[in-house]
Image: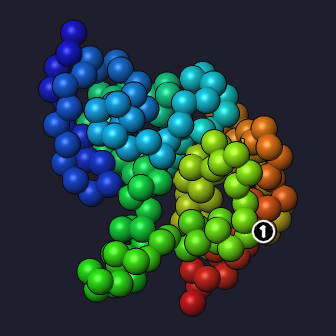
Amino acid sequence: MASELTLTVNGAKQVVSSAPETPLLFVLRNELKLTGPRLGCGMAQCGACSVLLDGEEVRSCVTPASYAVGKKVTTIEGLPAIWAAEKKLSDADAARTLHPVQQAWIDEQVPQCGYCQSGMMIAAVELLAKNANPTVAQIKDAFTNKAPSPHLCRCGTYAAIIDAVQRAAQSMKG
Ligand code: FES
Ligand code: FES
């Protein structure tokens, strides 16, 4: 049965009407029109739906919306604002600034079909928050060995992702 849930998504309070067990992904995409997180496997096995919950990556396809109550949800759409706040940018500068991870993904031309890339960038942001200067081995480890599953890319962009994470790490130091 639907009930009102108050979520904090990308810095804004949102009241949604959903059954508490509704996957967070569906609430984000269908109610809040945040279409960055994607439905891939729907079983926590690919990472296309990843978002940050209090800074930790979760698979939103298997995360009940009620679990996000009282936590901060960040989707790919919210990454520029996080960076702007961290750098104390003016509103004008913030409006034209991407998160360095997003910019690195563009500079390295990472996406092919793009379907998995929102989740890949979320994983990169989480990694760089914990390790500002990851080695190639640490990047591979973060994308492949962390529960619940590796981040999968059917287009095989893995090498470009490693380059982009390292590029983002450099630019975040500046
Ligand atoms: S859609 Fe959630 S992990 Fe694949
Ligand atoms: S870019 Fe196509 S699935 Fe990753």
- Residue occupying the far front of the picture: 113
In percent of width and height, residue 105 lies at 65, 65
Q: In this view, does 123 lie above or below 7?
A: below
Residue at the image point whose x is 49% and y is 41% from the top? 37
Q: Residues within 10 Å of mark 1 (few under 14, many from 20)?
A: some
Height in image: 4 above or below 11?
above
Residue type pointed to by label 1: Asp
Q: In which quarter of the image is ligand 2?
A: top right
Residue 79 is situated, as x and y percent measured from the top left of the image, at: 44, 62
Residue in view at x 41 percent, y 55 percent: 77
Quarter occupied by the C terminus: bottom right
Image coordinates of residue 85 in percent, x first then y, are: 33, 75
- For image coordinates 78% across by 68% down, the residue present is 163
Kindly identify which residue carries mark 1: 163
Q: Is 76 on the left-hand or right-hand side of 152?
A: left
Is residue 86 left or right of 121 when viewed as pictured? left
Above or below — where is 107 with respect to 118? below
What residue lies at 49% left-to-right and 70% top-to-bottom? 99
Name the spot of residue 106 as percent of width and height, x first: 64, 68
Q: Quadrant of the N terminus?
A: top left
Residue 140 visible here: yes
Q: Quadrant of residue 87?
A: bottom left
**Of residues 172 and 153, which is closer to you in this image?**
153
